[in-house]
Amino acid sequence: MELQKKSEKYLMPAVIALWFSFLLLPFKGIIASAFLFIALAVMIPVIKNILSLFKKIQLPSINIRQYLPPDSRYYFLLLIPLSAVPFLAKDYIIDIAIISGIYIILALGLNVVIGFAGLLNLGFVAFYAIGAYSYALINTNLGLGFWSAMPISVFLTTISGFLLAVPALRLKGDYLAIVTLGFGEIVRLILNNWDSFTNGPNGISGITPPYMLDISLGSLSYYYYLVLFFVTISIFIMRRVHASKIGRAWVAIREDEIASSAMGINTTFYKLYSFAFGALWAGLAGCLFSAKMQFVSPESFTFMESVLIVCMVIIGGLGSIAGVVVGAIILVFLPEVLREVQMYRMLALGAGLVLLMIFRPQGLFGGKSVSIGS
Amino acid sequence: MYLLEVKNISKHFGGIKAVEDIDFKLRKGLILSVIGPNGAGKTTLFNCLTGFLRPTKGSITFMNKEISGLSPDKITRLGISRTFQNIRLFRKMKVIENVMVAQHSRTRSGFISAVTHSPVFKKEEKVIREKSFEYLELLGLGAYAEKISGSLPYGVQRRLEIARALATEASLILLDEPTAGMNPHETEEMMTIIKNLMELDKTIILIEHDMKVVMGISDYIIVIDHGVKIAEGIPYEVRNNPMVIEAYLGKETH
């Protein structure tokens, strides 16, 4: 028994090391392979021991919520420093701030579906794409400006969210995730291949920036205020909906669908509602994106984008509005900060995510409770 | 006048007859117990009554309205509510929020008033919060209102489920093994709670294995075995029915 344990402890790393060195053999030759073999065979037991040490350490549980102001109205004060940003920061920072604003709106939308209603949607980027493209097409073909084209394209996106949900909501959990993932890819492929309508992989250019009283909002600092305005609106609406019977119904469905239908909640209706309501914000974010870039192409709406938005929601803490906002900001800014380390930045980002999930699986702001208003 | 009339309902899963031709009538303000060995079809019967399963045949009339085949949420809105054998709370929500969810169908305000915080919305939220608290007090849960429901002790969770079922403002409450896994003291408390519900003008159907509870509080008992009703009557009659003794203890062989 003892012998078996010992041999397992040292034999398995040796086998794993052998495998990796074998894989390396055709690329780097026998000497490099031998080095890799020795390094792995020694390192794996060491790492295992370190990890088992980690398990013994009890991390103090930090409740971030207790450091936040008790009354949500204080958050409006944040608008003061935020409005000063265009006067103080470089164009580069303002640009990233605009992008993170767009992602905040997107992530808040996905948070309705995943965080509140508990439905895993891996194709959320599809709604972002529909919003961006419908705005681009309406703007370039019909010549409508931002303020008239935006409501139309938001409406279209909401409808598309509803239409996807009708067949998809027969499925649960993993199956729903796969269907939504497929939907995301379908939308991207249609945009990529329907040359006569979407101009295919070349994308649509010449989209006009928003105007207000004949002033173009295309410059960075004006656009920053426009995005800040929409982010404020979306957080405000999101908080209020979350603290109403609609939000309660969503969370109840996430917690226990059967029990919530026994409480008189029409679960089908509220799941459709969450899909459509989530898509609405993706539509708005899409409009803001295409009006900012003045160019859209299918390349901006790949599966990786969906994954990124899901990460934002999970990092912040499922179902927490403040958390999702912080998650979105972190995931937009971090790659920029990590530009220093060039090719390793995606690696560093990935390692950071893994560490976060090990030490704080509920996300930065996710406490034990997903509390609803009060 | 009967509150609930069940006529010949059957539920078949493929070739298995989980419930076969069961009928009973229930007057307002009574406690009806459904008993039988494990796997007899009691919970299947509950699922048919509350819309989680569509009966293969037969009819269920509640307050003169045919309800078989309606969806669970519609049936709840008509006034039948239930608890679950394996507790199904909204575990990450606060206790008070659990009960507020049950008031869902009693509120009118929608999206617009939620976003604008209209006076109607504010008033409604206040009313359902107060009402929910009353239901909690009724079951002695007032002190737990702000706690997370998943963290509560088992017995308290059971009581919260009943509070939640009451908060739907249903007139007929279906309790699926409310004393399962409880110690004798907690069981006693539960019996008092169920009796107290009668003062609220509720009608109750109870699935229960604890014979002390069944015999102590039921007005009428139905015994089911292998999906078929094998006996019914007041507690005294059922207790002495040879068919019932056989179903529970087996047949004498000599």
Image: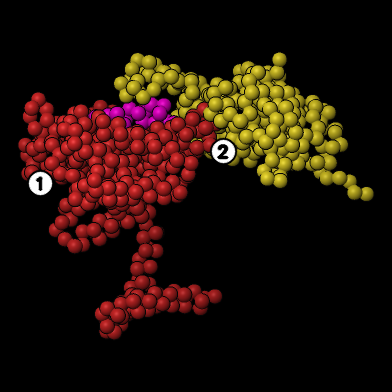
- Type of amino acid at the residue the image marks with label 2: Ile
- Give above or below for A40 relative to B105: below
Residue A92's tag is 1
Of all chains, the one bearing label 2 is B
- In which quadrant of the rendered view does residue A230 lie? top left
Q: In this structure image, what is the colour of chain B?
A: yellow
Q: In this structure image, what is the colour of chain A?
A: red
Is A243 in the magenta? yes
Q: Depth check: A166 or B53 in front?
A: A166
Of all chains, the one bearing label 1 is A
| Place of residue A60 in the rendered image (x, y in percent of width and height, measured from the top left) | 34, 49
Question: Which residue is the site of mark 2?
Answer: B87
Could you tell me which secondary element the residue under label 1 belongs to? helix
The answer to whether any part of residue A199 appears in the image is: yes
- Give above or below for B216 relative to A107: above
Look at the image and give the residue range highlighted in magenta. Answer: A233-251
Q: Which residue shows up at 30% across the image and 48% down it?
A: A190
Residue A25's tag is none
For the N terminus of chain B, the quadrant is: top right
- Type of amino acid at the residue the image marks with label 1: Tyr
| Place of residue A64 in the rendered image (x, y in percent of width and height, measured from the top left) | 30, 41
Q: Which residue shows up at 33% across the image and 40% down it?
A: A110
Task: Give the class, few, some or many, for how many residues have Cα within 10 Å of label 2's Cα (few <14, many ≥20).
Answer: some
The answer to whether any part of residue B143 appears in the image is: no
Task: Give the class, few, some or many, for how many residues have Cα within 10 Å of label 1's Cα (few <14, many ≥20).
Answer: few
Q: Depth check: A100 or A353 in front?
A: A100
| Place of residue B51 in the rendered image (x, y in percent of width and height, measured from the top left) | 60, 32
* Residue furthest right as drawn: B254
Instruction: Label the magenta part by its dominant secondary structure.
Output: helix
Q: Which residue shows up at 15% across the image and 56% down it?
A: A339
Could you tell me which secondary element the residue under label 2 belongs to? loop
Q: Mark 1 and mark 2: span between their CA atoms?
A: 54 Å
